[in-house]
Amino acid sequence: MRVLPLLVLLHASVAPASGVAEPDALSAAAPESRDVLLRREVAQVALAQVRKQDAAWHPDQRDCAGLIRFAYRVAYKRVAPERLVTPLWRDGQGQPSEFADAEVLLHRNFQLLGRDDATRESLRTGDVLAFRQEQDAGPIFHLMLVVRPEDRAHAPARVVYHPGEKGAAVRTGVLRNLATEAPLEWRPVPRNASFLGFFRFKEWMS
């Protein structure tokens, strides 16, 4: 797995996210919709990997797509375990699968929302930023997971991602800063040809 060469703005430490509930708070929040609870758990799981990667996240699957798969699976296990009777993902042929790499996640499991600033402002936790970098050996896809409190007054939207290098730390940073200060090839802006857009899990499109 190639290393994502994006070091500015995104780092391996993060304060507890406002609006992300602890497990005890979740049990007390039964009236909230499954959608809200799932997103909250995805945020909690993803940010926990920044502090210390969970032993349950297999080392062989620690890359950008693996972080998304792990965060989603744990969230569903906590909130809606009945959904895991069948695999969450679709493979390259559209069949149920426990595994999908970054490219297959995008093409089979997530739906494009857009590439513009207005779409960026509408993102919710669990949405994904996607990039495609052309390399001599072929294109490399990279994904970043969005974490954003439902009450946006509490904290800015963040991205959480694994850079792909074996043993690397999970990193996080403010989405707005990524869009304005990162090297152009990693900015989620329309003028960046490497930026594929903002995506949402197809099951969360309703």
Image (cartoon, rainbow, N blue to C red):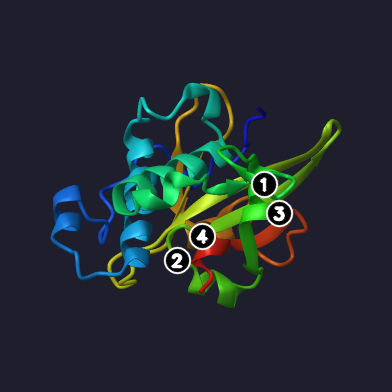
Look at the numbered disc 2 and give the secondary structure of its residue: loop
Say whether residue 27 is left or right of residue 175. left
Q: Marks 1 and 2: which is nearer the front?
A: 1
**Residue at the spot x=37%, y=30% of the render?**
53
Which of the two marks, 4 or 1, is nearer to us in this view? 1
Instruction: Tell me how far mark 3 sits from mark 4, CA to CA.
Output: 14 Å
- Packing grade of label 3 (10 A; few <14, some 14-19, many >=20) is some
Question: Foreground residue, 94 or 120?
Answer: 94
Few, some or many residues within 10 Å of mark 1 (<14, 14–19, 20+): few
Q: CA distance from mark 2 to mark 3?
A: 20 Å
Question: Which quadrant of the figure has residue 188?
Answer: bottom right
Q: Position of residue 204 (x, y in %)?
A: 49, 65
CB-based contact (under 8 Å), mark 3 and mark 1: no
At 14% from the left and 51% from the top, the residue drawn is: 24
Mark with earlier residue (3, 1)? 1
Which mark is drawn over residue 95?
Answer: 1
Residue designated by label 3: 107
